[in-house]
Amino acid sequence: MRWLVQKDLRILLRSPLLVALLIAYPVAVSVLVGFALTRGPDKPRVAFLSQIPSSAATISLGGEEIDANRYADVLFEAIDPVPVSSREEALRKVRDGEVLGALIIPPDLIQKLQSGLEPGTVEVFYNAEDPVKREFVENTIKAQVQDANSALTERFTEVALGYLDLLVAGGEFDFLGRHFSVLGLEKSEQILRRAQADLPRGSPASGQIDEVIRFAQIARENLDLSDDVLASVGTPIRVKQTVVSGATTPLAAFAAAIAVTVSLMFVAVLLAAGVLALEREENAFRRLVGGLISRTRLLAGKAVVAAAVAGPVAFLMVAGFAAFLDLDFARAPLWALAALAGALAFGSLGLAIAALAREVRAASLLAFMVALPMAIVSLVPSGSVSSGLYDVIRVIAAAFPFKPTLDAMEAAIGGGDGGIGAPLAHLAGLALAFGAAARLALRRFD
Amino acid sequence: MQATAHETTAVLQARSLTKRYGDRLALDGVSLEASRGERVAVIGPNGAGKTTLLSIIAGIQKPDEGEVNRSPSEVGWVPQQAAVYSRLTVAENLRFFARLEGVADPDAAVERMLEQTVLRERAGDQLGTLSGGNRQRVNIAVGLLADPPVLLLDEPSASLDPRQRDRLWSFIRALGDAGTAVVYSTHDVQEAERHGHRVLVLADGELLFAGTPQGLEEEVGGSGLDFESAFVAFLRQRGH
């Protein structure tokens, strides 16, 4: 088998362009995939018009001044604002496709917010030329307006709570330039109790004062509870996040695992399929199995060639990613293990494909046709399809090496909760199964 | 041209070989013998079973019935199309197959074959750059690496031009003269007459004749027919 592997590697090296393509193409594709996965979409260009006079950009709430520009700055972190001077200019830019949308802040927004009686309204115009980007703009602006609403609600709640405290405990406050002193329910109750004590015994006013004292008492006790009620109204739902299953791999590490697995898949599948089909194309297969080497050893040799090339390619890719993504180099032995197991499983699949297709070109085409859907199916997340369909997808994904290789890579790179043992065992099983399928198909190879 | 004398001790004996592909009978109890230095030509129409017979003797296929006295490792096999690697050089091809054959000294075997095939000057050339004739010589050399007592050639001169064919047959005759029993199939019945000591005629998997070319001519009366005409007449006579 050693001579067979050596011969295949020598033949590969005789075709430097093919080797370069075989390695460089999937690496380039996978790096682009990884890049696309780690890099978010560009900020959408949105025309922005604030019709609020700069002198009136503050909201006065409970004696405190809130700068509306602070909320605009938050919005600008998510969009690329294109300042415009008029509503017409904003609409024209949207129609001409210069911007994906326009956000117009009306001049009365601050007044309405300050009054607390009527909600303020902002206007958003979209360019629907690109549905994906339109959806992105829509979601971005909605999310940012939602954030602004939450922040303002919180501020309104604080102000309202201040007023309620004033009603309960009494104190001083300013409104519309005038100063007020509020007695408060607690002090009112104390004053009434003292006045009731000064009344002659049996006075009819004592009963009436008693009713007022009870009212003040009930009001004070219930208003004390209003802090919690208003806080709940301000943020009715809070989020507590817990990962129930799956790895807690960071997105960048996951993207690296995907990129490496895609490369490994293409190199190992295409190489194994190519070197086996080449034996038939060179008419050497019959000579080899006619007493020189058994079919099983021939297949094993081809799997070793695929693993010997694809494994190191995958390992070097992870090492390359490690330099950019701050991966832990101490886990390098696990990277190598995952790369080797994945390469062997993908190689076995490539052998089965070649044994069926029999010719290099047909094998390459079939390898692409099998590999691409296999990768796509394996990346379908749970919850994105019905549970029945997802079960089918899981079974299909488990029958091919992509998903277990991705799991092994993810565990090796990111050190997720799942561990690497199960995916490695899965890959070993698949390597044997596809190897057996290739051996069966080889009966009609010549 | 009639062959030179050869020893009569059989170095190859195949008995009652039968092979079926589904319902089709490809070989029907065919027996064959070849002696040291003898050249045996297997001829017959398309689908007669020539390649099946040779590939069973070479161990490429298993017969449904019958037996061969030689193990595959004792038989050199030269398939019709050159079974060598076009991206490897002549020497690399020979060395690779010598190692797989388990030859004791692969480098010496390569040297011997380069000498025998007169391809020493092309030893470093990739097979893809050689002419069809030279490729076929390397193809035959691979079959001879283990110095087998029997060499099987499946249509060795197909796709060669007359000059290349002439060189090839000189080479094969030299092998026979050196003691190798050569069994070859061919579509060119003149090659069977010219280079074979004996001729086997197969049709539809059945062995119709085994004897000298003159014997075949005599079977159809020997009335001045050339060998090709005698062969066609013989097949017609036997209902093929």
Image (cartoon, coloured by chain):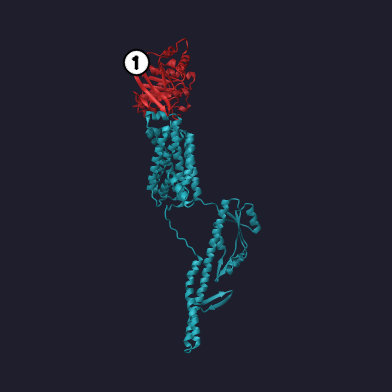
Chain colours: A cyan, B red
* Front residue of this view, candidates B73 and A151: B73
Residue B170 visible? The answer is yes
Q: Position of residue A313 (x, y in %)?
A: 44, 41
Tally of numbered discs: 1
Which quarter of the figure has residue A176? Answer: bottom right
Which of the image's four quarters has the C terminus of chain A? top left
Q: Please, is residue B1 above or below residue A343 in the view?
A: above
Q: Secondary structure at mark 1?
A: loop
- Left or right: A316 as drawn, with respect to A105: left
Q: Position of residue B215 (x, y in %)?
A: 41, 13
Q: Position of residue B100 (x, y in %)?
A: 37, 29
Which quarter of the figure has residue B171? Answer: top left
- Left or right: A350 as drawn, with respect to A177: left
Letter of the chain that mark 1 sits on in the rendering: B
Find disc 1 in the rendering and name its residue: B8
In the rendered structure, which amino acid carries the disc numbered 1? Thr
Q: Please, is residue A10 above or below residue A383 in the view?
A: above
